[in-house]
Image (spheres, rainbow, N blue to C red):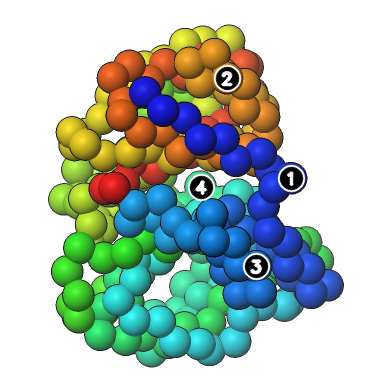
Amino acid sequence: MKINIHRSDTRGISNHGWLNSHHTYSFSSYQNPERMGFGALRIINDDVVQPEMGFGMHAHENMEIISIPLTGSLQHKDSMGNQHVIEAGEVQIMSAGTGITHSEYNHSTTHAVSFLQIWVLPKKLNIEPRYEQKRFDVTQRKNKFQIIVSPNGMQGSLSINQDAYFSMIEFTEDLSKDYELYREGNGVYLFVITGSVNVNGTCLTERDGAEVTEISNLQLKGQKGAQLLCVEIPL
């Protein structure tokens, strides 16, 4: 097994006042030839948006876009007619396909919103644009992997146009868990949201990430209070 660590302080930063964004991979003004993506995983942006601020209407095509609010809520509007508020505990996915425009604003007038936005290259190009949003029972990720995104919507997850699987786990006690691949040959990107997780002897702390390949036995030892996102992705 191979592990490539991304410490939180090695990410790119874009601070515009209203937006403070950390980029795991090259995005916007942050361009790093050694950070151009991980297989079909193209972007992991860790965003904080100030009250009533946000991204005006902008376009995407042929990209799978997943948004995961961590605290607060987002106001979403798009060219398909969707107008929704996405809150912590919910997950949103858009298949941009042949083209979509959308906007994202902090829904609150008083509190910042923190969210992850992840871009995945699609399996099929030029599909009809699609939108899904779902609230997940976060108690179902305590000390076990809760799948939130998958190719076929398995176990109530959101569907993605790629052979990718997103799972979240929250450790309520010091515990070891083995992650088992859904698809042989995939890699796994680990992103620690809070706390610390030991990955086969390597300690990751808050907002650290790791690319894991050539997986045989991926053992994760989470400390109490740790929250982890696992993105299994075709390489």
Q: Are marks 4 and 1 in contact (CB under 8 Å)?
A: no
Residue with the most extreme front position = 33
- Residue 188 left/right relative to 7: left
Q: Residues within 10 Å of mark 1 (few under 14, many from 20)?
A: few
Q: Which residue is mark 3?
A: 30
What type is the residue that disc 4 sits on? Answer: Gly
Going from N to C along the chain, the mark reached first, 2 or 3, is 3
Q: Are marks 4 and 2 in contact (CB under 8 Å)?
A: no
Instruction: Give how far apart the Cα atoms at labels 2 and 3 are.
Output: 27 Å
Q: Which residue is mark 1?
A: 9
Instruction: Give how far apart the Cα atoms at labels 1 and 2 are.
Output: 17 Å
Q: Residue 63, position in %: x, y?
A: 34, 71
Going from N to C along the chain, the mark reached first, 3 or 4, is 3
Instruction: Give how far apart the Cα atoms at labels 4 and 1 are.
Output: 26 Å
Q: Are marks 1 and 2 in contact (CB under 8 Å)?
A: no
Q: Which residue is mark 2?
A: 202
Q: Which residue is mark 4?
A: 89
The residue positioned 21% from the left and 36% from the top of the image is 185
What type is the residue that disc 1 sits on? Answer: Asp
Is residue 139 in view? no
The residue positioned 51% from the left and 20% from the top of the image is 199
